[in-house]
Image (cartoon, rainbow, N blue to C red):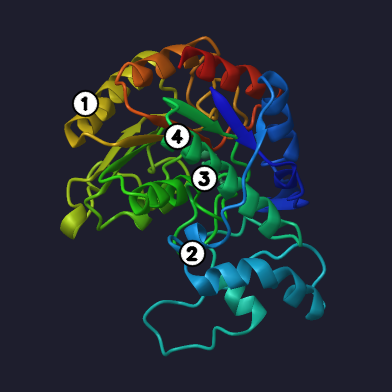
Amino acid sequence: MRGFFDPRQLAHAPALELHNGGLIAYAETPARAEMIRAALPALEAADDHGTAPILAVHDAGYVDFLQTAPARWAEAGRAGDVMGYIWPIVGRRPVRLDRIDALAGRYSLDASTPLTADTWGAAYWSAQSALSALDAIRTGDRAAFALCRPPGHHAGRDYLGGYCHLNNAAIAAQAGIDGGMARVAILDVDYHHGNGTQDIFWTRGDVFYASIHADPATDYPFYWGHADEIGEGAGEGATLNLPLPRGSAIDAFRKALAQALAAIASFAPDLAIVSFGADTYVDDPISGFAIQTGDYAMIARDIAECGWPTLIAMEGGYAVDALGRNVAGFLAGF
Ligand code: OKP
Ligand code: ZN
């Protein structure tokens, strides 16, 4: 299976994130991508598809914010990385959103996803890696891997959050549709619910979103990922959420996976995109499932047996020492 990555994705390296009321070292490190890369046969450089496929999903004002906020933040004399810390309360009088501090709140979901001067470039190339994997499939490959980093599934049309800036899976899905595919399914097997992907396609009937994740009653992103969230309008029934309790291991995970795969099979996609997070791993430092390294091949086989052209896009996974073998195990199983 061909895989894609650009070294510019490594440059995004914020110092700190807000965690349990304090600041800790940022968990979504460049070392994650290095470990994955080291465990795989050589990845290919991503091709540059420009900003058009990004703007087909993301709001132009938001993209401008990603590009310009670090400089504006520095000009305003703020030390440290850009991090939202003040949000407009909804339902009150209209407020000015043009100041850098207001924009950081306006365009963010949480205060744990800092921007540095290198973030835009890294996020841009992360999205290009996903688009390059799509090209491989369009030209006949059965499957392709995109080492997306930063990840994408928490980012919405006009907001960042959960270590995500551009929604790589959504950008590839939209590019597939714009390239003539009638239906794309996104299967999200990261530990966390992909609220951004769900939100982007919430009212769409041409992109099916299925996710297996930790119950939002106990885990990030808390507001989204409940079983009763099924989409609206033309998208009603095209969102499937399968939350699992903390502690869930491979048997429960595979049962949910079978349910997700059956739903996707009924949808009959032209392309499947797997938002693959290895943070379901038993020793992941920020997560609570109990998937073992050897289980990833089985999960991948279950998906591969469905026979769809499949783009695998990297999302989370924070047990850095085990990350390479967990991803390599998944891809080998596929
Ligand atoms: C990203 B992905 C605690 C802040 C909240 C956010 C978790 C984002 C996970 N430090 N952490 O889905 O792997
Ligand atoms: Zn995750």
Extreme residue toward the front, this view = 139
Mark 1 vs mark 2, foreground winner is 2
Say if mark 1 contacts mark 3, CB within 8 Å: no
- Residue type of the residue flagged with mark 3: Leu
- Name the residue tied to disc 4: 139
Judged from the image, the secondary structure of the residue bearing numbered disc 1 is: helix
In whole angstroms, how far apart are the C-alphas of marks 1 and 3?
Answer: 26 Å
Residue 55's mark? 2
Judged from the image, the secondary structure of the residue bearing numbered disc 2 is: helix
- Residue type of the residue flagged with mark 1: Ala
Q: Quadrant of residue 66?
A: bottom right
Judged from the image, the secondary structure of the residue bearing numbered disc 3 is: helix
User: Which circle's residue, 2 or 3, is located before the other in the chain?
Assistant: 2
Residue at 60 percent of width and 72 percent of height = 64
Neighbours of disc 4 within 10 Å: few (<14), some (14-19), many (20+): few
Neighbours of disc 1 within 10 Å: few (<14), some (14-19), many (20+): few
Mark 4 vs mark 2, foreground winner is 4
- Asked whether 300 or 174 is in front, the reply is 174
Residue 262's mark? 1
- Name the residue tied to disc 3: 131
